[in-house]
Amino acid sequence: MDASDRGEEDRNRPDISCELRSAQFTKQSTRDSTLSALVRTIESEVIPRLLLALQSTPVLVHGTINNKPSPDDVAEFAGLVTTRDFSVATAYIDALLSKGLSLENIYLELLAPAARLLGEWWKADLRDFTEVTSGLCRMHQLLHEFSPVFLQGAAALDPQKSVLLIPMLGEQHSFGLIMVAEFFRSAGWDVWDLHPASLEDVLGVVRKTWFAIVGVSLACGSKIDEVTPLIAAIRAESRNTAVRVMVGGQPFISHPELVARVGADATSVDGRRAPLEAARLLTQVPPRA
């Protein structure tokens, strides 16, 4: 076949390029149409149904429940926060909320006991300092993460109800105190939470600012004799000459008689009762000048 014959054959051969382009265009159009329909379905049906489902199962912040975290749950959670990512701990709490546990009970029946268990593990050399510190840091993050939810419906702020919360000088971990601060805020208190490096840090604040209540948290029983001079100095230097002092922590829960021994006015067994006890003490404080 010579060149002229091949040229004639090419001219007579059907041109399928346009057909291919047309088919590709049709295929792409179909794909785009299907994707658009899927997006519209998600936006118009799936998302509204998810939002409705979420709205129908609101988070229960306060209140009591029959089912609460067991000791096994506490141990599991304590182990989880020492070894797993923060997102895993958040998902764990979300799962408990979805089962109907209140956030208040999760604070009191899961987080607080888990923090104590970490301390026990540390003392028994079952976890090292890094693991315990990591676990407590993650629980601090959890309190921060859930704080906006916990404080929904908080009582109106009352300037007369001001409280300074401090850990015992020299103590590193203050998870329990931070949790107590959340309960005070929920009850409408003006909360100052200070982590002082020295006695002068504490006294400098109480000299300048009027507080109805000062709360001191003690984690280590071996420091019990150091609480008495701290409270005496707070009373002597306080701008509020009738300041009331509360103490908290396991040493006082286990031995309530220590409250009077260190010169404090009251204690509380948990964060939920702390604002109630403080309010009782407040009735004994003269009105602010």
Image (spheres, rainbow, N blue to C red):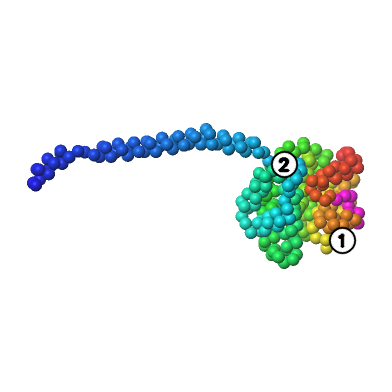
Which residue is drawn at the image coordinates 67% and 54% (left, top)?
A: 138
Q: Which stretch appears magenta?
A: 259-267
x then y, percent, for residue 124: 74, 66
Q: Nearer the viewer, mark 1 or mark 2?
A: 2
Query: Which of the 4 quarters of the picture holds residue 31?
Result: top left
x then y, percent, for residue 23: 31, 38
Of 210 and 81, nearer the camera is: 81
Please tell me whether mark 1 sits on a helix, a strand or a loop: helix
- Magenta residue check for 263: yes
Query: Which of the 4 quarters of the picture holds residue 3?
Result: top left
x then y, percent, for residue 206: 83, 48
Q: Which mark is residue 61?
A: 2
Residue 4 seen by the camera: yes
- The residue under label 2 is which amino acid type? Val
Of 103 and 281, nearer the camera is: 103
Which residue is drawn at the image coordinates 73% and 53% (left, top)?
A: 70
Q: Which mark is residue 225?
A: 1
- The residue under label 1 is which amino acid type? Asp
Q: Is residue 95 left or right of residue 17?
A: right
Please state, as top left, top right, bottom left or bottom right, where the C terminus lies in the image: top right
Residue 207 seen by the camera: no
Which residue is drawn at the image coordinates 49% and 34% (left, top)?
A: 41
x then y, percent, for residue 181: 76, 47
Estimate the spatial distance between the alpha carbons at disc 1 and disc 2, rounded to whole Å: 38 Å
